[in-house]
Image: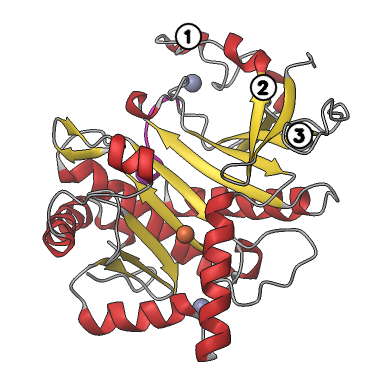
Amino acid sequence: MDKAHELRWNPLLGCWIIVAGHRAKRPWRPEEKKHFCPFCPGAPETKDKGEWDVLVLPNKYPALSLDAKEPTRCDELFKSGRAVGVCEVVIETPEHEGDLCDLTLNHMKKVIEVFTEEYVKLGNIPEVKYVAIFRNKGKEIGVSLTHPHSQIYALPFIPPRITIELRNMEKYYKEKGKCLICTIIEKEIKERTRIIYENNAFICTLPFYAMWPYEVHVYPKRHVTSLADLSDKEKLALADALRVMTGTYNALFDRDMPYIMVFHQKPTDEGAYEYYHMHIEFYPPYRERDKLKYAAGIEWGMWTFTYDGIPEEKAEELRKACLKFLSRSKEYLGKCGGSI
Ligand code: ZN
Ligand code: ZN
Ligand code: FE
């Protein structure tokens, strides 16, 4: 590892930055042709792996590593830390093209099982405090490889967004004696104006407090803190929900829709966090078919989001797109008790 590979502390915001100098050299969308794709079967990266349907590989340009150097600066203000951790890539299918909705239900469930295994395995590494699982799709999001894949960052700290959620869920639990997200789910089911899709174990809702025009949260109906708490049947229901949501996005404007998908789970440090309710969040960057929503001055500079439109109306659009997707893809209807 070169020397520009460390954590740096931002004392203004109280959070870590991962400095990874070598990542600047990584290729930008190198393969437009299938035979250059490093994730396709037969590529140097994948060819000694035998038959596979879902494959975990170490990230070739990791921002974190287990043999990271000791920090170089430890004065109070300009403090650095060990960039210790693991960066992995989960190749979701040998197929070069497609989205999660193009996987079969059982294949998608296998992807979730792999996420679960990695969450547990990486979370057991003593230095790892948080396992961040996410999926970036589309060139608008800056994805350098088009072959379907997700990423996992096993971090040596709890990221700021999770810290905020933990704080609010803990506060709610202490004050009301119940879980914040469990209560939100009850309200969403009662109001039914923002739910896009629901099956026997999950609801997909455009939250009352959405920041992105077509943001959707996928909430497990049962109070679970991480993927590791899900039963086999719930994993199948999650596979169903993620297939349906990505299919819904692609049906919305009849175009391949880019998005960010993140798993919010409890940290893997010593804490208990029983009040935390795991969930998945989707942020697609479009506000109309050909118009991007940018996180600009007020959003990025202030972390205050303006919502272009009315969440309940956007939810209605997504519900229609969901019906369109479901009518095209009837083979799994009813498998997990799905309804709109
Ligand atoms: Zn490929
Ligand atoms: Zn809950
Ligand atoms: Fe969240």
Q: In which quarter of the image is the C terminus?
A: bottom left
What stretch of residues is rendered in magenta?
96-103
- Residue 260: within the magenta? no
Mark closer to the observer (1, 2): 2
Report the amino acid beneath label 2.
Answer: Ala
Mark closer to the observer (2, 3): 3
Residue situated in front as seen by the camera: 242 or 210 = 210
Q: How far apart are marks 2 and 3 (CA)?
A: 16 Å
Q: Are marks 2 and 3 in contact (CB under 8 Å)?
A: no
The residue that mark 2 highlights is 20
Q: Position of residue 82 (x, y in %)?
A: 81, 34
Q: Which residue is drawn at 13% across and 35% down?
A: 289
Residue situated in front as seen by the camera: 1 or 189 = 1
Q: Distance between the residues labelled 3 and 1?
A: 36 Å
Report the amino acid beneath label 3.
Answer: Lys
The residue that mark 3 highlights is 79
Q: Where is residue 167 in the image (x, y as percent from the top left)?
A: 57, 68
Report whether the residue tagged 3 is closer than 8 Å to ligand 3: no
Q: Do the residues labelled 1 and 2 touch (CB within 8 Å)?
A: no
Residue 30, numbered circle: 1
Q: Where is residue 293 in the image (x, y as percent from the top left)?
A: 23, 37
Report whether the residue tagged 1 is closer than 8 Å to ligand 1: no
Label 3 sits on a secondary structure element that is loop
Residue situated in front as seen by the camera: 327 or 199 = 199
Horizontal arrangement in the rendering, residue 274 relative to residue 309 (left or right): right
Label 1 sits on a secondary structure element that is loop
Q: Quadrant of the N terminus?
A: top right
Q: Is residue 175 above or below residue 160?
A: below
